[in-house]
Amino acid sequence: MYIILLVFAAAVTALLCLLMRSYRAVAVCALAGSLAVFVFALFTVAVWFGLLPGGYSALKFDGFGAVILTLIATVQLFAVSAGIPYLKAELEEGTITLSQVRWYGALIPLFVISMAVAVSANGLGLMWIALEATTLATTMLVAFYTKGGSLEAAWKYILVCSAGIAIGLIGILLLYYAVYLAGNGADVASVTWTGLLASAKTLPPAVVKLAFVFIFIGFGTKVGIVPMHTWLPDAHGRTPSPVSGMLSGVLLSVALLIIYRAKLVVDAVLGSSAWSDNFFIFFGALSVVVPVCFMIRQKNYKRLLAYSSIEHMGFAVFALGFGPAGVVFALIQIIGHALLKSALFFGTGNILLAYKSTKFEKVSAVARNLPRLAVLFTLALLMLLAVPPSPLFFSELGIFSLGFASHPYVSAIVLLALVIAAGSFFMNFMPMLFASHEHAQPLHQDKERWNAVHTVIAAALTLAAGFGIALLIGPGGQMISRIISIN
Amino acid sequence: MNPQLYRPLVDVLAGLMLVSGVFMLGRVRVRSLLRLFAAQSFALVLIAASGAVFEARWHLLITAGLVFAIKVVFLPLFMVTVMARGRVGERMTSSMRPALSMFIALAMVILGFYLTTSLIPTLGDNFFVAAVSISLALLGLLMLMTRKGLYGQIVGFLILENGIFTLGLALTGGMPLLVEVGVFFDVTIGAILMALLTYRVHGETRRADTENLETLID
């Protein structure tokens, strides 16, 4: 029930943002709508965990999905808050117009609706429609700035992702076909995740396996699994920073959740997870190793963060190949990555505003010029590199302890790649933050003031550290594994 | 109506879709490409409509109507309008010569039939339509990858989508109506967005291909 209120609130926000006449009004509207979405999402999750009465049968979560919905709600609230000072500065500079701001305000809630529905829809058809809608809602946000490669990024984004999701549709059609072949009185008109899991024993394995391959390749495009990742650095690099944070923090996880659900189905049909695990381990390892090659000599800091998202998602995919314990660590990885990476992207917004460039060579001495941001940014960076109490420390430790036991060689390669990734972060970001060099752009702003971006990064850091400490003390890990066991 | 006519009729229509798909790979002018696309989509309309009439699945009539309105009429006209407004040349560029593209297209058709036989052996009567749709999806992907012209890429995506739509009809006799309408809505918005982006590319570069869209590389 609350999810309908969520969709309704976001839709009203989108409409109101288009009608507002001043920047202030759009901002108030967007923030109010975002808060409403946040509250309704929490209520939805509470209903699912049985803390509140009610429920609605067409929309159903598993524990994994409930966590992702909570993340969507949190990150979108952060992104909208961080977007308010960011867009205001760009509007005052004349980089964008008020009408662009209105569209921005309208497209963000539509993006949130499509993600929330994709996560909570039980019907496969509705889920597909919502997932494709996430691409459509964000295309114009990728093409937001009318200049400098934005069009190219948007073109690649919509074409590659739409084609990928279309291939995923073949997989879904094959699942429909599997239900139709099983012919156990199940209504073909309503193929749902829960229905597939319940009737798994009757489904023909060959068709379901084929369906899984199509779903993995198709929706893997949206996760950014190598080699279907080509759109990702461009789109994340070109779009406004708050949107980059949302794309990277939650959209990738939404697509990964859907692949995970397909894995549950194929595992139930085959009676073991051995067959699908290999996919996850192979493509996961590939998605960690390949982006690292592009991170070492990266010139653009937003693109570096984008490649790091591919690597982190790849690591979560890798983790999903290690049975139930792997799933727990994958979820911890996703939570940590969503909070920290989106915070870093919000921070790049402030750097971009101050230095007018996304190139490492044009930015220097951030610690002197933007001291508050530099502190928060460095902390987020360290936590992203899995320095405790970051939750990523626990997930990476856990995955490697599982990985070295069963797949030592692959795990060693992945570990090496992670070390190089951390090295490339230090090599590229530390000079930008703490050194000054002559190519740097002159600063476009006189004195740094604490704004919503700082608050949001601090909040994300607190949440991530709190979660990490909960994992350290003990109850966090048990909680996550209990959440996942809910179906 | 004679129910024995249904199967041959659908097979002939699917065959026409396939032939038009192969020919599209060889087209270099936007208008003639779009005309072929409209013809292919019209064959899809007839397949859906005959499913409705012969097998009494009446909701397919609505699907057929939507395909006709959007894919046969609206999208081709919309793209021609965008092209005329953008004042760009009709000729599309491709990284392959037309003859070579058609040759590879034929190879794709063989691959599509082979894949269908080996991967989904339980199709029975629907084999031909399913094989055609898998081949069409492959042809669409081929076009998407080899064309440099923006319109060529859009039409490649739409051919892929036509193939998947046909596959849906062959495998399940059409998805639930609401899902089909939703899928259709997404595809339409997607194509419109692509055309709008193309229009902005025209405005910036006076071109209709990706020559100026190759700056973002590492």
Image (cartoon, coloured by chain):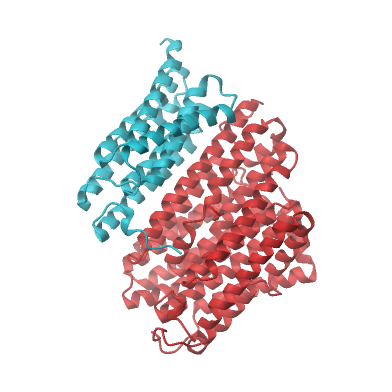
Chain colours: A red, B cyan
Q: Is residue B139 left or right of residue A460?
A: left
- On screen, A391 above or below A48? below
Of residue A76 and residue B85, the one placed in the foreground of this image is: B85
Q: Position of residue B23 (x, y in %)?
A: 33, 32
Q: Residue at x 43, y 62 (%)?
A: B217
- On screen, B21 above or below A440? above
Classify residue B216 by image quadrant.
Answer: bottom left
Q: Position of residue A431 (x, y in %)?
A: 53, 83
Q: Residue at x 51, y 32 (%)?
A: B175
Classify residue A338 by image quadrant.
Answer: bottom right
Of residue B208 and residue A8, the one placed in the foreground of this image is: B208
Of residue A52 and residue B44, the one placed in the foreground of this image is: B44
Q: Residue at x 78, y 54 (%)?
A: A406
Viewer can see residue A313: no
Q: Position of residue A470 (x, y in %)?
A: 74, 70
Total marks shown come to: 0
- On screen, B198 above or below A377? above
Viewer can see residue A423: yes
Q: Position of residue A175 (x, y in %)?
A: 59, 35
- On screen, A142 above or below B76? below
